[in-house]
Image: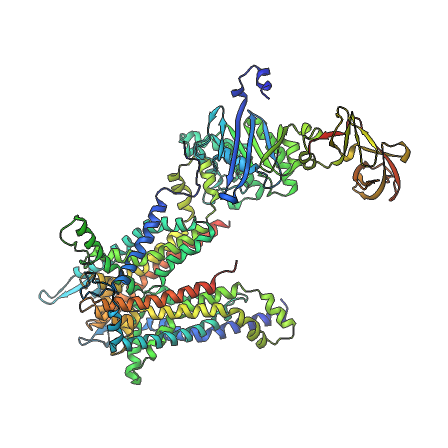
Amino acid sequence: MSPAEQNAVRQSARNGWLLSVPALLVLALAASGPLLIVVYYSFLTANDTGGVIRQFSLEGWRGIFLTYDIFDEEYRLADAHLTIFWRSVWLSLTTTLVTFAVGFPTAWFIATRPAQQRAMWLFLITIPFWTNLLIRTFAINEVIRNEGILNTALIWLGVIDRPLQIVYTETAVLIGMAYVYLPLMVLPLYATIERFDMRLLEASYDLYASRWRTLRRVILPIVKPGIIAGSILVFVPSLGAYVTPRVLGGGKKMMIGNFIELQFLQGKNWPLGAALSVTLLIIVMGALLIYVRVANRDRSSDHG
Amino acid sequence: MAERSFEISRLPGFATIAIAAFALLYLPIFTLVIYSFNASNSVAVWGGFSLHWYADAWANQAVKDATVRSLVIGASAAVLATTLATLAALGTTRRKAFKGQTFIYVMINQPLMVPEVVTAVALLIFFGIIKVATGYQGLGYLIAAHTAFCIPFAYLPIRARLESMDLALETAAADLYASPWQTFRRVTLPLLAPGIMAGAMLAFVISLDDVVITEFVKSGGQDTLPTYMLGQLRRAFTPEVNAISTMLLGVTVVLLTAFFLLTRKKD
Amino acid sequence: MIKYGDELGVSVADAVTISARNVVKAFGQGAGTVRALDDVSVDIRQGEFFTLLGPSGCGKTTLLRLIAGFEMPTDGTILLDGADITTLPPNRRPVNTVFQSYALFPHLTVAQNIAFGLEMLGKPAAEVKARTAQMLALVKLEAMAGRKTSQLSGGQQQRVALARALAPQPKVLLLDEPLSALDLKLRKEMQIELKRLQTETGITFVFVTHDQEEALTMSDRIAVMSAGKIQQVGTAKEIYIHPRNRFVASFIGETNFLTGTAEEGALRLATGERIEVPGLKAGGHATVIVRPEQLRLGPAAEGVLRAKVGSLVYFGTDTHCHLALADGTELVARLQNPASGEAGLGEGQEVGIRFAEGAVQRVED
């Protein structure tokens, strides 16, 4: 490169940074930066009236798994906390599975429509995607609550004579999360399937594979990146879900997100809440890292 | 006679599941909308068509305040986020890869990756410290928070638009004696406008929808529509919430339709 | 056509592998219906290299897809060894395809691609392994067995596609313009390779192409198609020397057309000149063809036809001489260049045209 060219490249990079700085500043102040304070707070001592006392302590972190029994004066496994973790992980995994089971056929259906119809079907998926999560949670609540249309219909049909208690159970949270996060599974799956070379299906059928074997041996391995992307997109917000378990779990079937809120807004234990937040963040980052790894591996093996 | 077709891309049962999925996706939303027009006081019984829940919501001072607050925050956040995102998009696209570019991408997309409740906690603590230090309690905190998480949503369509733009157009402008600023004003910006509009609309919708971060950051008496509705849950469910939801839903659908028309590829 | 089987003393069903009977394939509905195949009947014999040749949109690929089972005909039947396979799904037909795009599975290695069909047929693992190795050797890709297909060159991908389709030992191998993506040199090599594979395996090949040279050099028999119909079926020589109609004559090689009034054993042109056409019956309008290499030029007084030299285009081995008859009809003569490199003609010169023995052929319009 000539000095003039080098100069031009350097100036271009400088301009790139300069133009990005205002956005970065806002993000650093109102999104990323404060995350560091959360880490700091997780190592401080709880103040019983809310907030913290600026004194180093590991109680917050210990509190994730252990609880101090004031009668026996010893630490015990915090069963209630473990139940919440287990519920969060279990519900998030099940939500991911349910959304995949429904979302994959849906994405396949959209991707195999004639080109001019596809935009319409996709639009029908994106409307719920952009609609307020709270509204959608209210909406599913209208269906499954005791006086909701599901119970009303079942009673009218004579299938049951008393309404099924669905709301305020784990099932309700699962139904709600699967409902609100379904578009997050469908969209990346659609993006991958749309690029899938349908001629490979002809090759597979030509080589004696049945439809089921074509699905298992050809389609699923090739659209794997989309499956992983969709699973991460559903799993991550499920794990941190706050609104859906609060509305449909009725404060009883808490998930990590609600548990964190409890520590802060009810003013009980800020360091514990901070430690829980950091833990959640680490799990989510781990999941994202796995995704990036897998995506990169698939891309590099494609191009030799 | 045997079936005279073999549809290559058909998989058994898939269409049925897909249609069922679409039905299940919309059934709850339609239910919500229909119930908002229910004349009956009870949420369980259909008592005929009525607009009185809308009238109730309209007459409710708290709802009015929350609506105005949502709109003010949404509009401010959308304008700020779109401006910042446009600058960042101009800075990060269509130039040779430079040192730190990946860092900028990660920073901009960070709100998409971190669980909302974690960001909410972080802002609660951080803004809490500032509130104590400065004594300022206003809407600025909410606007700043909303601006931050709206940036990636505004950034994506603008960047996509920029990347699909033909560099030759700007070269042509320069060839026709336009200065860099004139080129930007007269060529780049008008071509970019649909992307900017789309970004602004998405940012507005995202801001209007936010519950978690607002719930943690708001000071007393700073409810937006979503946090107001969430608060109503402590009491009995009323069709008034359905009416507010339906109105919000309407705004979202209108904005999204506009967004799609703006970003639609010309055939 | 039936004589072929009779002469060999075998039944017709044994000799014919694929038989299409009155096949119609229509796409679309109502006024927009397009007939991609319009009442096509053809018999493809066992062990032959059969080519479907025609311009794009003539229906050749549609016919191939009907045989493969990717599409089903609107009307008519398709028989394989005498059995009706018209509505059999593709995964139950003992027929394999080499796709134009190759359609190799990107997530599988070369060996896994080749083994795919055998595995789907439920062959024992040992047989799959042995057969895959045999196929790799056949297409000379032993060294590439473990590679992903995206790491191969176009020619190598082509070979994998061939090996994959041949591995299950199909009764018929269908090839859909398999050489069109290759460059000229590689295409020539693959033509020889394909012919070798066909001879070695003895499998019936049905080959689709729009390239007449490819068709002429490789095929045992060729079906020339146009507008959803088969125009003529025959060996390369038959369709070149005795094209049945104007379309076949113009699509295969270069041709001069002459039209005029039919007389007993001759054609009277508009210029009043007369060309002998053995067997032509008097009455009505007729068209004859003469290939450019069959024209002989001499002094104006000695020819059957009198023409004026228009332009001369030098092609190295020969010169193309564009001629005009008195009524403006244009003809092209291909003249072999003498060692001196000069054809000895000048533009605007008056010449006489004669035709080689038997070169003038009558064709249907």
Q: Quadrant of the N terminus of chain C?
A: top right
Query: Does any portion of residue B200 appear in the rendered image?
Result: yes
Relative image position of residue A72 (x, y in whole percent)? 9, 64
Which residue is the extreme one toward the left? A71
Quarter residue A31 falls in: bottom left
Relative to the observer, which residue lies in front, A163 or C276? Answer: C276
Q: Is residue B179 left or right of residue B135?
A: right
Residue at x 48% of width, y 61% of height: B264
Relative to the observer, which residue lies in front, B93 or C66? Answer: C66
Quarter residue A289 falls in: bottom left
Which residue is the extreme one toward the front? C283
Relative image position of residue C30 (x, y in whole percent)? 49, 43
Residue at x 56% of width, y 25% of height: C47
Q: Is residue B103 left or right of residue C98?
A: left
Quarter residue C153 falls in: top right
Relative to the observer, which residue lies in front, C277 or C15? Answer: C277
Q: Is residue C343 left or right of residue C69?
A: right
Residue at x 47% of width, y 63% of height: B263
Q: Up-down: is B127 above or below A290?
A: below
Query: Does any portion of residue A240 appear in the rendered image?
Result: no
Which residue is the extreme one toward the top? C9
Relative image position of residue C245 (x, y in whole percent)? 68, 32
